[in-house]
Every structure is written in structure tokens, then in C-alpha cells.
Amino acid sequence: MTTVSDSPIPRLTTEPRDSLTVFLLGARVNALLRPRRWMWVGAAFRRMAAELEADPGLGMLHSRTLPSMRGVTVIQYWESTEALLSYAQGPTHSSAWRRFYRQGGDAVGLWHETFEVGLPQAGAAAGRSPEESAPTQRGYEAIYANVPALGLGRALGTRPVGRGTQRALDRLALRRARARTRAAEPAGEDGPTRAPNP
């Protein structure tokens, strides 16, 4: 016979780390009665999760999947934004994203939000100039395709994706550029002048 211990669960914290990237992503089923139009998304999520768990060198530190009635939310912790974006450009993710756009329709929606946490991270793309690769401000970015406003979109509002916001790196760079512009503005009597949020 086993007994349940009455000892309390200890309070814990994390090991210190200068920076990391938190990535939230999800799928929302919009057409429950057309499973052939959206079942492939679950298979693609599982394939990517297996690939990331099998190779720690890809940069994902941990992942947790939270199912819901109409879809799934995945919380991932990455070594860096550079590692995340490198994986996103790889064949497994790229083929799933292309299929989503090729198939079109509104049977399923996809979304993600990226948050850079801690000290500023280095530039996140191969082939960037030394100036572009220098450590920059922390940033965040998001995209929502065929889903209602949620998360950051609900908190801050949304706007259409345009020429300068097609890629995650472009959206992160936009936030970083605004932060650099604000930091470079001369301080007035009341402190730095701040541009209004978009």
C-alpha cells in the first residue's frame, strides 16, 4: 500500500539566463464539420514537435501543448530568436506554411506571437551586415491568419500585414527601430519625447 506524503512542495525558481525567446503558436478550427480541410495541421504540429525534441541543437529549450475545444496552443521556450527563425526557414516548417497558404480557405486559422525576454539579443538572420547583427532592443511580433483577435492582437489591436511586415524578422525590426528612434530623440524639459503607439 502506498501513502501520500504530507510534505509540502518546495518553492522553486529558474536558473538565471541572460536572454531567451518565448514563442506562442496555435491553430483554431473554424470549420468543425470539414475535418479533411484541417486535420493535416495537427499532423504538421506533431511532426515539428518531434523534430525539435529529437534535436536539442535546433535551439528549443522546452515546449508545452495546451489543447482546447477548437484547437491547440503551444508554448515554446527558445535559446534565441535567431534559433527560432532559423528553424522557421527550414524545410519542415516552410512546407507546412506553404501548404496552409496554398490550400487557402477558412477551415483553420493559424497564429503565433514571439517575445524576446532578457538582455537585448543579437541580430537574427544569416547574411545581415555587422551593423544589423549588433545587439538590438528586445522586441515582439505576431501574426494572425484566419483567427479572431486574441493575445497581443486583442491587447494592442491589429492591422493588415503589408510590404514591410511580411516576415517575422521584419515585424521584430519594426519594433526595434521604433525603440531606437525613441531612444535617440532629444530629451526635453519633461524628459524624452515619446511617439504614440501605433
Image (cartoon, rainbow, N blue to C red):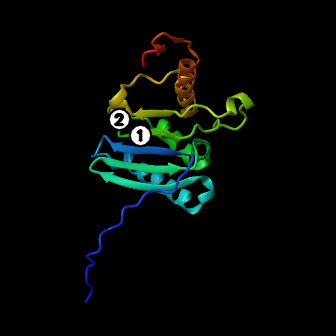
- Circles 2 and 1, Cβ within 8 Å, touching? The answer is yes
Question: How many numbered dots are placed on residues in this image?
Answer: 2
Q: Quadrant of residue 143?
A: top left
Q: Which residue is mark 2?
A: 147
Which image quadrant: the N terminus? bottom left
Disc nearer the start of the sequence (2/1): 1
Residue 33 coordinates in the image, percent (x, y): 27, 46
Q: Which residue is mark 1?
A: 110
Is residue 171 visible in the rendered image? The answer is: yes
Residue 44 coordinates in the image, percent (x, y): 47, 52
Q: Quadrant of residue 173?
A: top right
Residue type beneath disc 2:
Val
Q: CA distance from mark 2 to mark 1?
A: 7 Å
Which image quadrant: the C terminus? top left
167 left or right of 113 in image: right
Q: Residue at x 49, y 56 (%)?
A: 62
